Amino acid sequence: EVQLVESGGGLVQPGGSLRLSCAASRFSFSDYWMSWVRQAPGKGLEWVANIKQDGSEKYYADSVKGQFTISRDNAKNSLYLQMNSLRAEDTAVYYCARLVSSSGWKFGWYFEYWGQGTLVTVSS
Amino acid sequence: SYELTQPPSVSVSPGQTARITCSGDALPKLFAYWYQQKPGQAPVLVIYKDTERPSGIPERFSGSSSGTTVTLTISGVQAEDEADYYCQSADSSGAYVFGTGTKVTVL
């Protein structure tokens, strides 16, 4: 069974930085797009960022563009999210997820497997 | 970007059928996906490509699509199905959108 384990969350002051990690196992990490999705306390799910298998393409939600950076190290089977200039509204559980495409008479992408999440709290 | 609209809540008695709708203008062109999230847990994929069920998901979960609306149906609801359910879609521009979420309460 695919395993994704996030780490690096914690309490950070407004304006601070944090780097999240996601350790992937039990699948060929370098073969998949990967994503970060977050969920503010008591709120719904919000996609944050995606990265292609070789790291050559990255996409971000408008809410984090220029503030967060997604990266990966295929040799270490790890996904990262560098978060800078953090604000209270960035407080959330951050999940890493494996991203898969669908094709057929329509198309789309979905989050096939999720980690258990890591909580980031931005507060003074 | 676009929006996916779900009812905030659905209540159902055990053994009955729960239907959760998700509406979005792009759904005639894009597949929809459904996730179940129980309190304190990560989301779990229950339906992909509008109607397909991943292995390990009970047969009582099914999906359908008609025009701008997709529907998640839980037939013979069990107490363990009480959870939040989110639809999700994506487009070629790289935007990924989740629905507003529906809380299913088993009475």
Image (cartoon, rainbow, N blue to C red):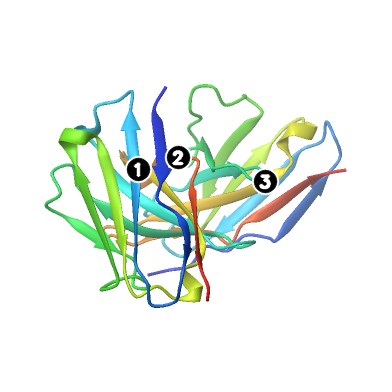
Mark in the foreground, 1 or 3: 1
Contact between labelled residues 2 and 1, with CB atoms less than 8 Å apart: yes
Residue B72 lies, in percent from the top left, at: 61, 43
Q: Which residue is mark 3?
A: B39
Mark in the foreground, 1 or 2: 1
Q: Residue at x 26, y 58 (%)?
A: B92
Q: Estimate the spatial distance between the alpha carbons at disc 1 and disc 3, rounded to whole Å.
A: 22 Å
Residue B86 lies, in percent from the top left, at: 57, 51
Query: Which quadrant, please, contains the N terminus of chain B?
Result: bottom left
Q: Quadrant of residue A44?
A: bottom right
Q: Residue at x 29, y 64 (%)?
A: A60
- Above or below A97: residue B68: below
Task: Name the residue type under label 2.
Answer: Gly
Does residue A54 show up?
yes
- Above or below B102: residue A33: above
Q: Are marks 2 and 3 on the same chain?
A: no
Q: Which residue is mark 1?
A: A22
Tag 3, which chain? B
Task: Name the residue type under label 1.
Answer: Cys
Q: For this view, does A109 lie left or right of residue B5?
A: left
Tag 1, which chain? A
Q: Residue at x 48, y 32 (%)?
A: B52
Residue A18 lies, in percent from the top left, at: 35, 61
Q: Dot 3: few (<14), some (14–19), or many (≥20) neighbours within 10 Å?
A: few
Task: Name the residue type under label 3.
Answer: Pro
Q: Which residue is mark 2?
A: A115
Contact between labelled residues 3 and 1, with CB atoms less than 8 Å apart: no
Q: For this view, does B53 lie left or right of residue A57?
A: right
